[in-house]
Image: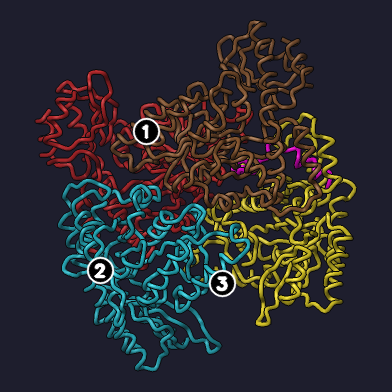
Chain colours: A yellow, B brown, C cyan, D red
Amino acid sequence: MFRFNCDYLEGAHPKILERLIATNEEQTPGYGEDLYTASAKEKIKEACACPDAKVYFLVGGTQTNVTVLDSLLKNYEGVLSADTGHINVHEAGAVELTGHKVITVPAENGKLSPEKARAYMKGFYNDVAWTHMVRPGAMYISHPSEYGTLYTEAELAELRAICDEYGMKLFLDGARLGFGLAAEGTDVTLPKIAKYCDAFYIGGTKIGALFGEAVVFTRKEDGAYFFTEIKQHGALLAKGRLLGVQFDAFFTDGLYMEISKKAVAQAMRIRRAFEEKGYRVYIDSPTNQQFFVIGEQKLSSLLKNVVVDDWGVIDAENNHVIRVTTSWATKDEAVDYLIDLL
Amino acid sequence: MFRFNCDYLEGAHPKILERLIATNEEQTPGYGEDLYTASAKEKIKEACACPDAKVYFLVGGTQTNVTVLDSLLKNYEGVLSADTGHINVHEAGAVELTGHKVITVPAENGKLSPEKARAYMKGFYNDVAWTHMVRPGAMYISHPSEYGTLYTEAELAELRAICDEYGMKLFLDGARLGFGLAAEGTDVTLPKIAKYCDAFYIGGTKIGALFGEAVVFTRKEDGAYFFTEIKQHGALLAKGRLLGVQFDAFFTDGLYMEISKKAVAQAMRIRRAFEEKGYRVYIDSPTNQQFFVIGEQKLSSLLKNVVVDDWGVIDAENNHVIRVTTSWATKDEAVDYLIDLL
Amino acid sequence: MFRFNCDYLEGAHPKILERLIATNEEQTPGYGEDLYTASAKEKIKEACACPDAKVYFLVGGTQTNVTVLDSLLKNYEGVLSADTGHINVHEAGAVELTGHKVITVPAENGKLSPEKARAYMKGFYNDVAWTHMVRPGAMYISHPSEYGTLYTEAELAELRAICDEYGMKLFLDGARLGFGLAAEGTDVTLPKIAKYCDAFYIGGTKIGALFGEAVVFTRKEDGAYFFTEIKQHGALLAKGRLLGVQFDAFFTDGLYMEISKKAVAQAMRIRRAFEEKGYRVYIDSPTNQQFFVIGEQKLSSLLKNVVVDDWGVIDAENNHVIRVTTSWATKDEAVDYLIDLL
Amino acid sequence: MFRFNCDYLEGAHPKILERLIATNEEQTPGYGEDLYTASAKEKIKEACACPDAKVYFLVGGTQTNVTVLDSLLKNYEGVLSADTGHINVHEAGAVELTGHKVITVPAENGKLSPEKARAYMKGFYNDVAWTHMVRPGAMYISHPSEYGTLYTEAELAELRAICDEYGMKLFLDGARLGFGLAAEGTDVTLPKIAKYCDAFYIGGTKIGALFGEAVVFTRKEDGAYFFTEIKQHGALLAKGRLLGVQFDAFFTDGLYMEISKKAVAQAMRIRRAFEEKGYRVYIDSPTNQQFFVIGEQKLSSLLKNVVVDDWGVIDAENNHVIRVTTSWATKDEAVDYLIDLL
């Protein structure tokens, strides 16, 4: 049965797997002190047009979010996030485990809107009791967001301006970054992300690696002891070259974007099919996650043949929202099959 | 140049890599809810003769130590360890990051001796100020230890008895467990470890996996929410089946022990050669890590041809201790080459 | 200038100060192991009709909230609270510092309503991803709430039932508990609080002590190592008898209730005066905090003569909400003076 | 029965109590925003000859140690301490609760010797695996130490030099600071402590306050958000003026030194008496804690008449070490009585 319920259903993209196989029996130093890792770092700095960036590789998204935030924040600071933010909902309290509060404002279209962020910060410092409250020391945004939506460059610039005004760091969770960069119509690029953000990560797990996320610190003053912090957070891979090899492959001959574009294209084919059949698009996502409104009976019959994510009932008519997700591995025949079922 | 400086220099054992390749394009649910993981869990429970055990898979050793200890300990408890214990020295304070103190006693032969452990606990409760002190809620031991040494069954039984007397958990770090089980003359087996310990892990990374450690909780009362705790500690692998596939391979047709035995045999060949050439063995290790005393000049010439770990000067004659480590990947020709250099 | 801006403007009630003076030069053991503390504990257990309760004394409210919650919660659990809860807003992230998430639902009348609490818990376990989320292990309520409002016995019973259903602890923050017990029309008593809650504290600081809060654990299984946890959280007073002496005075000859009743009576006088002059009562509080709606100009002139808390503008006409607070020390002449200004 | 077992057996020194009584019914803002607190801060800055210092008041020693260290340390740093340090032994893991490791070297005469400290730091950065280890970001010293011993100015200067060399903060725990400043022969003064240390605290609880410790940050770059950090650590006193009033009294007309000198003089009388009677002095302490060696039988008869601290057996002849402690409240008749018993 074809599965569309998430983008980490399969192993690695064949070109990545091939590199892991080719290098498997080589002896290299551990913990990322190998040449593959060094090469991957250089390629990423170049792709970000940020030659002085510091690049580190971690294994998964939650550990990356918490390790970067713990590094950026002072011990008494928290992080401002949309209430739908992954760190607020689906990371089992990992950020709080390291002592930092996740401060939330209601999401707009899955995003932390500059208006809401500014209003919060203004209100914070206007509160007579603000010294009794958790100072937001950073903003957390995900791009694409948990709903597949994207920030515009103007929004990133505005969030940056707020961060500058209030002495905050801007951190972008790029678990699905490739799909954001590959979206039609986006004006956000890696160099622009590097320009506006203090730190971000380029997701590997969901784009076609076995695992792996590449953290980029763009500012001189950040991340100097990050290696030790990775270890401290239990996030240091002994055979670190596995991360280097995979990201080196991603950033060779444009593989990262090639994979991302293909997945987005499949998502768009699915979207058009749903639209043509008269389904309502629930959220306007230009990336690999698509959200549709579907009646209970239809969903029930659909689920007999494919796996999609049921996000539950949204109205009195028992309509559901479903999430349909594509990845590097989504085959044409799977998409055809799904479309035929609509 | 041949490297003997650690046991995580290469990728995965060919039989494991083969299984990863074979299953690469399959679609499975994430987070370890796949059939490979289920199968690996069953095989491990059987190997431990502990049918009611709870088995979980994590990525690396430090994250496993900290996540298990945080699960076993009450918020006000610490963990008793030899001062040479990995959690005390080389984990960048990961245990303390979750709020627990590592309480140390001097190591004996790299181990936490039952005598020292008992003396500490007796002294603790005899101290009039013990309620102002951190209660040791668990013992941490590693088997093999950081010096390659092993506990006997009698020692494990005695540590268990102390834990029972003082209401403590016994946790065994098995990052190199295979090499311990494969050592000549040991009377410790997986079922015996399961009998004496509340929790332990079967190391994968250092035995021949790309990565991965299998945690076993042997007591009904422990580990019920461990899945959430793994997530909370940033240690949950999205493509969890990678762990299941690897451990399923380890526990099929005796691969785990086959790999371990081979590495130990190579270590013993190296040891005999050093002994025959008149070198002093620094610590009597029956496992894959061997420690020798070597003069500075000799070491210097050795390091021009192979990589071994220099643990520094130990006496006035400038003798050094070196660590020589074997793994699944240590080839006969590499051992021959090293021996020829002595 | 008379101040009505909070209930901790003065030192101690004369009867309490007198006891501190009388015992000042006595020598007693430290850390609460003295006879005054023992006596105070007995009196509190009696007042709660809970002879097996464990009673401990801490210095302030925030430290009490965080120490009790850290004791009640498992390491992977969070606490459910109204979004207006003191732990969520005005404790600078103290709960998160110990690793626990504060999970919020919108307050109703300053309270955590049973309906919202039940809905949250139901939704939590219905969420397919609940094992990736923070399990609410306790509920936090304050009585009176931050808005002076009170739970009814029926509400406490209902919250208790939800806690039982979902395996949660119920913790009541009683920083202003006396004012709640002294309110007209309440059906909540100390024994009923002890019956419904796993733990709560009887506030001293805001009722007329120099400082001090009395924690009561009502269930056998909780609080066994709480002395050590108090120390661990930096909340153990060296001269612990100061807490014992003060609470012994509170629970001698009904002083705690006498003080509380007087303050509530003064608050009611003020309220009636505001109502008679046509001011709108913002929230219906039967306790020592009163909230009124007042025009900007009037407020401005008021503030020239007395201190009240300005909670900011609430409508387009620039009306403000003010908080007027009474305490053990609120004198008739001060109330008269305030009323004359209206 | 006279007690000599610690220096916090009584309430407050009469002059301090008198000030608390005199100000009891005044209305002041909370949280230390009152004029008494402002006055006390000024006097302390003057006494320290450090006009730009930041001064804060907390309630007790453990909370002060942990809050200051958490403020000075980066999240991945630990604190270097003598193994006998209060933070390592008798604070129930408070420092670890906030995520920081206490790194220990063996004490010399109760102190962190510059030699041991330097050797540790040198060894740390010489260790090839230092990036896997906890970086010591601060040194913790107590003056007087837990054994009543004192640093010399030369030792403080040397510790400062090591801190400068390795980018560390120097923090001095002055729970008994007065007794150190009042000791005969010391060349350490408040201004010198301010010169060498980044932060320290002037103990109140053990010198004659009901409670209270005055933290001094001497460097511009430290402590800017310390108010919020105090709140975050549950250490903010609502009626903050109680701290201001007490420290204002301490630093008026030399009361702090007057009290300290008197207690040290009583301790010296006791010491001379022990020496004259032929008892061995266990540690050469010039402060209010004295340590003597005493036979079991003699101790037993002594304990029938006075309370001293038994620190246990130290040799095969069953000799014990006892601690005899004086305070502001130690009366001549009590000392006479004790001496008569020898």
Residue C193 image-quadrant placement: bottom left
Dot 1 amino acid type: Met
For the residues labelled 3 and 1, say whether their Cβ atoms are less than 8 Å apart.
no
Label 1 or label 2, whichever lies nearer to me, is 1
Q: CA distance from mark 1 to mark 2?
A: 51 Å
Magenta region, residue range: A229-250
- Residue depth check, mark 3 versus mark 1: number of the one nearer the observer: 1
The residue that label 3 is drawn on is: A123
Q: Position of residue C60 (x, y in %)?
A: 35, 60
Q: Residue A102, located in which quarter of the rendered image?
A: bottom right
Residue A154 seen in render: no
Q: Is residue B41 above or below residue A79?
A: above
Q: Check chain identity for marks 3 and 1: say if they share one.
A: no
Q: Is residue A42 magenta?
A: no
Q: Position of residue B121 (x, y in %)?
A: 37, 33
- Tell me which amino acid carries mark 3: Gly
Location of residue D316 with respect to C338 vertically, above or below = above
Task: Work out whether residue B85 can be spotted.
Answer: yes
Q: Chain of mark 2?
A: D
Quadrant of the frame with the C terminus of chain B: top right
Any mark on residue D25, and which?
A: 2
- Reading the image, the residue beneath label 1 is B121
Q: Secondary structure at mark 1?
A: helix
Choose between A171 and B41: the one closer to the eye: B41
Q: State left or right for residue D301 relative to residue D285.
A: left
The quadrant of the picture occupied by the N terminus of chain B is top right
- Residue B72 drawn at (x, y percent): 48, 44
